Each structure stands twice: as C-alpha cells, then as structure tokens.
Image (spheres, rainbow, N blue to C red):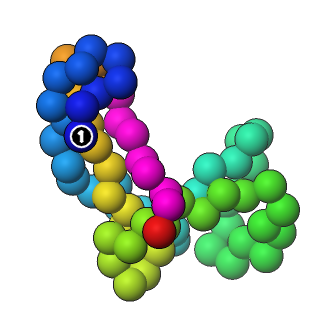
C-alpha cells in the first residue's frame, strides 16, 4: 500500500490488543465487558479469528498507521 501522505510504500503488520481494537469519538472508560457499544467502530478486519488483532499499514517516514477495517 502506498502512503497517502508521502506516496512511499507502507509496511503491513498488526496492531494487537487483549480485548479488541475499536475507535470511539471520545475517550471513555474501557472495561473487560464493554456492554455500552453505541458509537464504537469495531476495527476487526480479518487478521485473526478474535477481534484483538487487526492488519495495519505503517509508514516509517511519516509516522502514520492506517487500518482498513473493511472486511
């Protein structure tokens, strides 16, 4: 994947978390059993059966990480 900032090739790797990887519009308390999921975007993208690992592209020059969370 080409970096959208500098157009150099990005490196494919993983972002991992014990309890899943999500995006939220505001910082919030993160619990092991987060039942309140309104506004949360699950970033699971098929990197692993469990949602705690997602594929991500890293640009060493721009210091950017990109996660494509489409399935």
Q: Is residue 20 left or right of residue 3?
A: right
Give the tally of numbered discs. Answer: 1
Q: Is residue 66 found inside the magenta-colored segment of the image? A: yes
Q: Is residue 61 found inside the magenta-colored segment of the image? A: no
Foreground residue among 21 and 5: 5
Q: Residue at x 24, y 20 (%)?
A: 7
Farthest bottom residue? 49
Q: Is residue 22 left or right of residue 10?
A: right
Q: Residue at x 24, y 40 (%)?
A: 1
Q: Residue at x 74, y 41 (%)?
A: 25
Q: Is residue 34 left or right of residue 38?
A: left
Dot 1 alpha-carbon crowd within 10 angstroms: few under 14, some 14 to 19, many 20 or more: few
Foreground residue among 9 and 39: 9
Where residue 49 sits in the image (x, y, percent)?
38, 84
Q: Secondary structure at mark 1?
A: loop
Residue 59 lies, with reference to residue 31, above or below; the image says above
Which residue is under mark 1?
1
Residue 17, located in which quarter of the rendered image?
bottom left
Where residue 23 sits in the image (x, y, percent)?
62, 50
Magenta residues? 64-70
Query: Is any part of residue 32 visible from this angle?
Result: yes
Residue 71 lies, with reference to residue 55, above or below; the image says below
Residue 33, located in which quarter of the rendered image?
bottom right
Query: Is any part of residue 18 visible from this angle?
Result: no
């Amino acid at each position: 994947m080409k970096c959208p900032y500098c157009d150099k090739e990005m490196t494919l790797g993983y972002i991992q978390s014990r309890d899943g990887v999500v995006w939220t519009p505001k910082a919030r308390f993160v619990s092991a059993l987060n039942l309140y999921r309104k506004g949360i975007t699950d970033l699971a993208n098929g990197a692993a059966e469990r949602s705690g690992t997602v594929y991500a592209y890293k640009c060493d020059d721009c210091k950017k990480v990109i996660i494509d969370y489409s399935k």
